[in-house]
Amino acid sequence: MTRHRKKPQKSLRTILVTWFLFFSIVPIAVVTIYSLQAYKHSLENVVLQKLEGNKREIIRVFQDLEITLSRSSRRHASQKGLKYYLYRNLKRQIVESAMQWMNSTVIVHKLTIYNRTGGLIVSLSQNSEGKIYRDESLEKGDYFLPKEFLEKFEDTSANRKYIDFSKDNSLQLISFTRIVTDKGRLLGYLEEVVELNKKFFDDIKSKLNVELVIFDKNNFLYSGNQLSMLTPKYLKQLYLEGKSFNKVELGNGENFSFLFSDISWGDQQVVFGVGASNTQSEKTLDSISWALFSMFAAILILLFVLSFIISRLILKPLYSLLDAIQNIDLNSDYIEIPVEVENELGLLTKSFNEMAKELFYSQQILKKNIGELEEANQKIKDTQIQLVHSEKMASLGQLVAGVAHELNNPIGFINSNMVHLKEYSESLIKLINEIEKNPKKIKQLKEDIDFDYLTQDLPKLIKSCEDGSRRTKEIVLGLRSFSRIDEAELKLSDLH
């Protein structure tokens, strides 16, 4: 009988191609997505590390300014010549000393000296070109420090630092120092100012390639035209949110990453933020994404082509093997498939041919063994019937022997009693006949036959025979009850 291969619901080729593409595309897709996320995270870390470095650099600049300005203020305030000039109120000498200090210092942009009542003695400033000039308008105007300021300063240490935001978008770092004698007598005040102007912030911006914002509760300044789109309120809100790393979208489509930190100057604190544009990193990420997706698409196309080619190469011998398996007929000669390839599939085909051959011969041997087993089984059945018949006959013989034994007992003593009954009956008949002939010899005749003993023993013999016959009858009735199904019911019996 010829078998036809059924068409499966899903062909093996479709399943193989599907699984091949699945196990090829999914790992590549996962690696691609993971790589993009890793690149994105890496670029964010690069920006963050850059901002962290810039933040540390700016903090170090402020710390250096604070240390340098504090040393300058202490050194100038401790000059004995200045103390003497203040004590004697020698204004010309005070101005000359101040001019000498301004020429020798680098970081101080403004130096002011006051007398002990807070009146201005000399005010020196440095312009954008580095030239030092006197603000004589203030010196001639009898300028005095506010009384409230001096009262607060009396309760503090000898040096006080504070920050002032100027109107020209610059930050002034101020060191205010009391000038006292060795015995603690107040002689005057020294004020030195470091002005961080637009040029200072532009230099930092150019050096670090960042945008800067600096603000406190009431003031705000920033460097860079791009940040002008951001309102002070918005930037302060970012700082108050407590985020250490914020991404800010600008109105022109560009976004910045900001890192905020606090800077202390004396008792005051200002917040500064360093911002870096994410444009370049986003372009880099877009380039990487485009390259990865292009590579993924190329690999995907290549996998589709390879999957169909490989499926044809692999499945052709498999389909031949499948046809042979489905068309195998054990009643005919075995099928041998030609080996077309020398690889694992060829080895599989050889193994199938050997299996089919062994299966065919095993089938023939099995058929022969089945015939022998059927013949032996028939002999066993015949022998079993004979054994059952013999067992039945043996059981019947045992039953008959038992019944015969049971019947022999009552029949035996009945038979033995019949001998005596015959003798007793003959004696009685003889006695009757003799009495009719000779009535006078009746006594003698009775004595001859032992009539008294006979009359006593005869009823016993009769009764014994009756018992034997009754027992025989019970045995026969018992056999009849045993042979009848309707008599094999539960009944009350005497165990005795």
Image (cartoon, grey):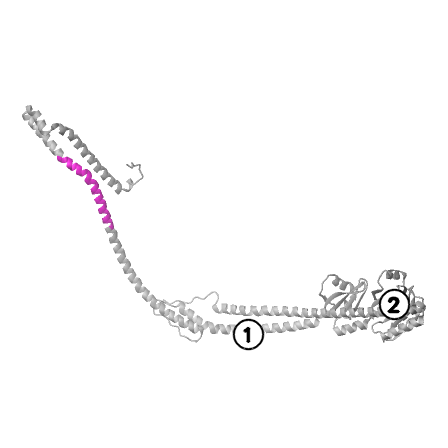
Q: Residue tagged by mark 2?
A: 190
Vertical relation: 444 (above or below) 409: above
From the image, which quarter does the N terminus lie in? bottom left
Question: Residue placed at 64% from the left, 70% from the top?
Answer: 39
Position of residue 398 relative to residue 184, above or below, is: above
Residue that label 1 marks: 302
Q: Position of residue 282 (x, y in %)?
A: 68, 71
Please name whichever residue, 412 or 297, is drawn nearer the observer in this view of the structure. Answer: 412
- Amino acid on which the number 2 mark rests in the picture: Leu
Q: Secondary structure of the magenta portion, mostly?
A: helix
Residue 289 horizontal/vertical position (percent): 63, 71
Any part of residue 373 in sight: yes
Total labels drawn: 2
Return the disc, 1 or 2, that comes first in the chain's sequence.
2
Q: Quadrant of the C terminus?
A: top left
Q: Image quarter for residue 293?
A: bottom right
Asked if marks 1 and 2 touch (Cβ < 8 Å), the reply is: no
Q: Would residue 50 be found to the left or right of residue 434 on screen?
A: right
Is residue 77 rendered to the left or right of residue 227? Answer: right
Q: Residue at x 42, y 69 (%)?
A: 322
Instruction: Residue 463 in the image: state x and y as whole percent.
Output: 19, 32
Q: Is residue 400 a member of the stretch shown in magenta?
A: yes
